[in-house]
Amino acid sequence: MAQAAGLPGVTPHVLRHAAVTHMAEAGVPMEAIAQYLGHSHSRITGQVCARFSPSHLRQAAAALDFGKIPKAQ
């Protein structure tokens, strides 16, 4: 499949991880991603796959961006 798409050396496993990352980035709930992949529990999906998403912890980091927290009056 990957070779036919002009992606030599890319395995189905890599394509699976890429799909999960894109779904997570698009805000698809982890439960839905887990079901799509056939995982028995969404925890597996989050631990194994979605953590590779570039913005996985973006919201957590943004909460600590003290320079952008409005000051109390």
Image (cartoon, rainbow, N blue to C red):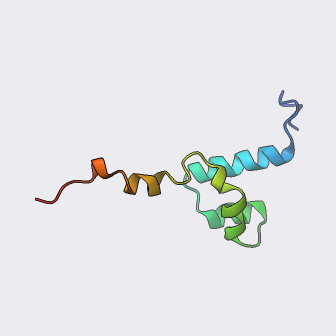
Residue depicted at 48% across the width and 51% down the height: 58
Instruction: Name the residue furthest bottom.
Output: 40
User: Is 8 drawn above or below residue 26 in the view shown?
Assistant: above
Residue 18 falls in image quadrant: top right
Residue 46 falls in image quadrant: bottom right
Q: Quadrant of the C terminus?
A: bottom left
For this rendering, which residue is in front, 35 or 66? Answer: 66
In x, y percent, where is residue 10?
84, 37
Q: Is residue 26 left or right of residue 69?
A: right
Instruction: Name the residue furthest top.
Output: 6
For this rendering, which residue is in front, 56 or 36? Answer: 56
In x, y percent, where is residue 27?
54, 54
Residue depicted at 62% across the width and 49% down the height: 53
In x, y percent, where is residue 61?
44, 53
Q: Quadrant of the N terminus?
A: top right
Residue depicted at 27% across the width and 53% down the height: 69
In x, y percent, where is residue 72?
15, 60
Count of numbered circles on the image: 0
Residue depicted at 74% across the width and 49% down the height: 17
Q: Is residue 27 left or right of residue 31?
A: left
For this rendering, which residue is in front, 8 or 28? Answer: 8
